[in-house]
Amino acid sequence: MAGGLLVAFAFTGYFSAKRLLAEFAAQEPRYQFERWAAGKQTPDAAGVSAALADLRAALAYEPGNPNLYSDLGRLEYWSVRTAGLADPVARAGRERALARFRHAAQLRPTSGHTWGNVALTRYVLGQVDLEFAHALKQTLRWAPWQPQLQLLGIELGLAVWQALDEPTQQLITEAIGRQSVWPMLDQKPALITLLRRYGRTELGCPWAGAALGCPGA
């Protein structure tokens, strides 16, 4: 019994140490990325490469951590954000980011943020297919009261409305209705902007009326 406990403690200590090393390696690139994404600092190529290397090192310590896959995917996506799809380097970067997001979704399938990243990356890559639709539905399912994720899902859905089946269109419609009564923040202006942009003003008529030029308003 004592020997078994010692083995258990040893394994626990080993994995705890690996987790600490992973968190230590990821701490700096996470901090840097937040500053870059917020426009507080402009990175050079060497800084981005170093951050990517640190996150890969963190993954080597803890390959089962979905947060690390998401961190790496976000940085890989962000690093090529300004380039078009015709650029093979940028496309490869987005494909790598998508692979990271997929892995994160496999490890933690209840994360609306992760599914939102999958859906957005598929859309940007022009891959509006069954995987895109699944990721879109999962985003709306697992983040029903996270307004920014809901707005992302709504915009992606409106952008490809004709490619969606009726049940998925209904999910988008329901998300719009939910966000129109979001109690913590008035989402109506953002929703009206999206509905006008994508020519789907009829979806807002139940609550927007004259603001969208709805009949009878």
Image (cartoon, helix red, strand yellow):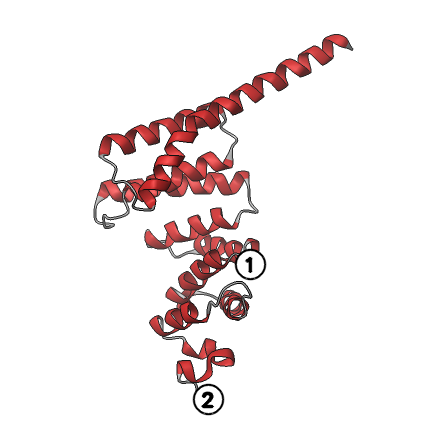
Q: Residue lying at the far bottom in this picture: please name it.
A: 216
Q: Earlier in the sequence, mark 2 or mark 1?
A: 1
x, y (%) of residue 156?
Answer: 40, 61
Residue visible at 26% across and 43% down in the picture: 90
Residue visible at 31% across and 41% down in the picture: 36
Q: Amino acid at mark 2?
A: Ala
Looking at the image, which is closer to me, 212 or 100? 212
The CA distance from mark 2 to mark 1 is 29 Å
Residue behind mark 1: 145
Residue behind mark 2: 217
Seen in the picture, residue 178 relative to 213 is either above or below; the reply is above
x, y (%) of residue 200?
Answer: 40, 75
Looking at the image, which is closer to me, 41 or 120? 41
Seen in the picture, residue 107 relative to 162 is either above or below; the reply is above
Q: Residues within 10 Å of mark 1 (few under 14, many from 20)?
A: some
So how many labels did they put on this image?
A: 2
Q: Amino acid at mark 1?
A: Trp
